[in-house]
Image (cartoon, grey):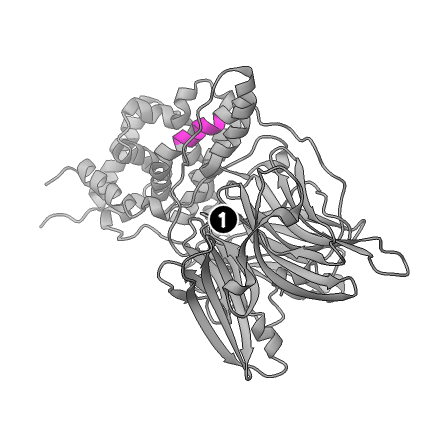
Amino acid sequence: MPSIDNLLRDELKRVTDTVQPGQLRPLWIPAPGHRWRRRLLPLAAAAAVIAVAVSAVLVAGPKLTPVPAAAPVTAAVPRHYLTFTFVPDKQFHDLPVTEAVIRDTASGKITGTVKITTKSFPASVAADAAPDGRSFILAIAENAPKDEYRFFRLPVSAGGKPGHLTEFPAYPVPVNAYLAGIALSPDGTRLAVSFSYGLGATNSGPAKYMVGAVEVINLVTGTVRTWTATMQQGHWYQPGQPSWADGNRMIAFTWQQAKSMSNNAMTMEGVRLLDTTAPGNNLADARMIMPKKAVSGTINSVLITPDGRDVLVATSRNSHGTVLVQISEVPTAGAGPVRVLRTETARATATTQGTLSASGQVLSLAPGGRYALVQCIQFGWLDLDSGRFTPLPAHSPTPPGQVAIIYGVW
Amino acid sequence: METDSADVIRSPGTPVDQGGPMVTPSAAESARSVTELFTEHHLGLVRLALLMVGDLATAEDVVQDAFEQLHRRWRGLRQQSSALDYARSAVLNGCRSVLRRRLVARRHEGRIAGPPPYGADAAIALEQRSELIGAFGSLPRRQREVLALRYYLDLSVADTAATLRISEGAVRSTASRGLAALARALPKEP
């Protein structure tokens, strides 16, 4: 009979071998600098941080070699997702308070909640799943003591428990901006913010001039770079939700145009790709990588895949009282077939048509780019390789009008 | 058409914040060193933490915190070659904190109604639990630590003593007591 120590050795090995590298989330280490920047920098892409140092050191002499990417990326369906609900709060005379709600992907059960209290009821929030798989980035509109956006990180433990909101310093999103979305770069060092805003407004009249803008905030150095699109012959432009490709280099976003200041109806033109390393600050110089005609129907939202080869597009169209919602994969090279990954239809009435048409969304991509959190009438995880759709549990999200946005975390 | 997020945000701005601190080469060096350590030992440390705390989600969190700690203190390490020992100690300390919190929670279970610390969603627990593993889990914390370091990581008595900051004699006696307890817990051969 084997000795007790050998038996123990074998048993410990057998039990721990149930954990395989693909199951583990990548590690994040804190970025150097102020305390607020801690926990922002993913170790998985520490090479990018080192590249900053390398460029400084090369001038002085000694060379540093880049570090290979470290952590394996999980290929499993993400474990948790985030929704927002508005809950009457007795503390504020039953005014609705925005609550961030973390839920378990498999069961839909709430694993934790965080109240977001501002001077607005409810608080307006935009969010993005951070690529570390352990946190969300939130942009919260604050109206007092002064109007501003505040940016926060919401950490989530592997068990789905939310931590404390950690605030980033204030950044220059202009007064009265209309914020279309935020996205954290794959290495977690850059925050892209997409918005549009008016200029020349007076007490008696609206803005005379509109500007569309994308900002990239370097969370390590604090520097900000802004690309703007100004009005051209009375036309103005609005960039949509940003998403990153090719590491920390390219940003894709939808591009909409309005014909005049008196006509706010936006016309979707397609998807543009901004090279953040190229010189210049004209947002309209960003390359059009997917014209609207590449897909049929109204483009609701898009996300570019991390390799930049494809754009995931959510579209909807109405026909004789039926709404058809589709999630498609469109190659950015301009050639190749469009892959329709999922199609859902629903009968619509005059009152439900608007809601159903808006219920096609691509919301976030899991690290590795294999799974996308989408809404194709119902919310779920879409396996981009096989097209398999795993709906989120039936009792979540909460009833229509309660959930503003929903993002996944891994 | 806009995304939902666009519908819910509208607001103003703030002055430009330019010129924050730069990344220094030493910071980059420490990031690189921690990256290398992580690449090589992450899985092993998560497995070690799993043996201590019993569920993967918590084990991952403990190791994450240990690496964050290591990164913060990298430049203060007396010998950077001993970073792995430091990481192991930090992981075991983190596990102890988790176990202490669980103990406190258990003591108050009757008084505070709430969800158990680890629900069904708490990812992978110690699966396929054998009688030996069950007995291992019920050993006192120090005995589990010593046995895990000695028989899972195959550390020498000296290395185990250094990691746990106890004497070599204490390692030997604790391991011996732990093994004896495990032997008693196993069913006797007919």
Q: Residue furthest top?
A: A61
> What is the magenta range?
B30-37
Question: A264 above or below B55?
Answer: below
Is A114 in front, or is B117?
A: A114
Is A364 in front, or is A257?
A: A257
Is B119 in front, or is B171?
A: B119
Subunit bearing disc 1: A
Name the residue located 25 percent from the left edge and 40 percent from the top edge: B181
Query: What secondary structure is found at the residue carrying circle 1?
Result: loop
Quadrant in which the N terminus of chain B is drawn: bottom right
Is A253 in front, or is A375?
A: A253
**Dominant secondary structure of the residues highlighted in magenta in the image:** helix
Name the residue located 58 percent from the left edge and 70 percent from the top edge: A358
Q: Is residue A220 visible?
A: yes
Residue B156 percent location from the top left of the image: 27, 25
Q: Which residue is mark 1?
A: A157
Q: Is residue B31 magenta?
A: yes
Name the residue located 35 percent from the left edge and 39 percent from the top edge: B43
